[in-house]
Every structure is written in structure tokens, then in C-alpha cells.
Image (tube, grey):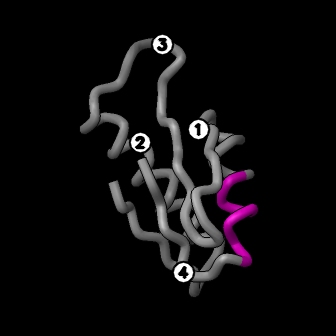
Amino acid sequence: MQIEVSDPAFVQSLRAYLQSQGCPSEPRSADVVEVRVWSPTAPLDVRQARRKLFGQLREWCAENPGVKVDLLT
């Protein structure tokens, strides 16, 4: 799944946070990262993966007020 960050200065912070939550990512551009969402206990379907990622993004955004993220895919 790809995520667009409103301020590219926060991309590394987001990537570090997602990595700490078990979701590795790769940069696709200055403000877009591609994230792999998985669970160590069972495979996730697309809906479960989106729900997990949405929760993580909500937490990260709460800690970084003013920065917005958009789930592109």
C-alpha cells in the first residue's frame, strides 16, 4: 500500500514508526512510501491490512500534529 505524506520532512519519521510496528516500507518519491502490512500469526486480507495500517497512521498522526497522510492504494 502507498502512503503520501503532506510534508516530506516527516517521511523518515513515519517509516521508522511503521518499521517499529512490523510494517517495513520503501520510499517511492520524496513524499510517498510503499508499506508492506503483515501479521506474524496469520496472513491478512486487504481489508485487514488496511485496517491495521489505518490504526497505525492514526496513532502516528496524533503524535505529529499538522502532518497529514493519504492512503493512496
Q: Which residues are magenta?
A: 9-15
- Label 4, label 1: how far apart the Cα atoms are: 20 Å
The residue under label 4 is: 6
Amino acid identity at mark 4: Ser
Disc number for residue 23:
1
Q: Is residue 73 above or below residue 64?
A: above
Disc number for residue 50:
none
Helix, strand or loop at mark 1: loop
Please tell me whether mark 3 or mark 1 is closer to you in this view. Answer: 1
- Label 3, label 1: how far apart the Cα atoms are: 14 Å
Disc number for residue 41:
3
2 and 1 marks in contact (CB < 8 Å)? yes
For marks 2 and 3, the one nearer the N-term is 3
Helix, strand or loop at mark 2: helix
For marks 4 and 1, the one nearer the N-term is 4
The residue under label 2 is: 52
